Image (cartoon, rainbow, N blue to C red):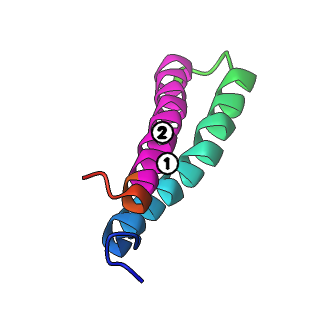
């Protein structure tokens, strides 16, 4: 096999770590958002709402970054 057609395992591991972080954020963000929207009368409603929306945005961004990193490891784009 050619060395040019091989997957870069270090970059692939980095991409899989990013996808793992994405998976955690994909559960944490919507769960916190649901808990926050159920308790609108609590004093920490606004700060928790902001944090949960930021976690959801981070989950989406880690998804795109992780997929892009994995594709870069497969197709050797550095």
Quadrant in which the N terminus appears? bottom left
Q: Residue at x 45, y 50 (%)?
A: 66
Q: Residue at x 69, y 33 (%)?
A: 35
Q: Nearer the viewer, residue 72 or 66?
A: 72
Q: Secondary structure at mark 1?
A: helix
Q: Nearer the viewer, residue 69 or 45?
A: 69
Q: Which residue is mark 2?
A: 64
> In this rendering, is residue 2 above or below 25?
below
Where residue 61 sits, quadrant-wise, is top left
Residue extending farthest to the front is 2
Q: Are marks 2 and 1 in contact (CB under 8 Å)?
A: yes
Q: Nearer the viewer, residue 38 or 51?
A: 51
Range shown magenta: 45-71
How far is disc 2 from disc 1 in space, using C-alphas? 5 Å
x, y percent for residue 11: 33, 64
Q: Which residue is mark 1?
A: 67
**Tally of marks:** 2
Residue extending farthest to the left is 78
Query: Within 10 angstroms of label 2, few (less than 14), some, or many (20 or more) residues?
Result: few
Q: Residue at x 52, y 39 (%)?
A: 59
> In this rendering, is residue 34 above or below 41?
below
Q: Residue 41 colored magenta?
A: no
Q: Magenta stretch mostly in which secondary structure?
A: helix
x, y percent for residue 22: 52, 49
Q: Nearer the viewer, residue 26 or 11?
A: 11
Horizontal relation, residue 57 to residue 4: left or right: right
Kindly identify which numbered label has been placed on residue 25. none
Residue extending farthest to the right is 38
x, y percent for residue 29: 59, 37
Query: Within 10 angstroms of label 1, few (less than 14), some, or many (20 or more) residues?
Result: some
């Amino acid at each position: 096999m050619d060395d040019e057609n091989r997957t870069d395992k270090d970059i692939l591991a980095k991409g899989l770590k990013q996808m793992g972080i994405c998976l955690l954020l994909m559960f944490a963000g919507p769960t916190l958002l649901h808990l926050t929207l159920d308790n609108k009368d609590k004093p920490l409603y606004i700060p928790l709402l902001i944090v949960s929306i930021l976690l959801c945005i981070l989950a989406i961004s880690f998804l795109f970054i992780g997929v892009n990193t994995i594709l870069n490891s497969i197709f050797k784009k550095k």
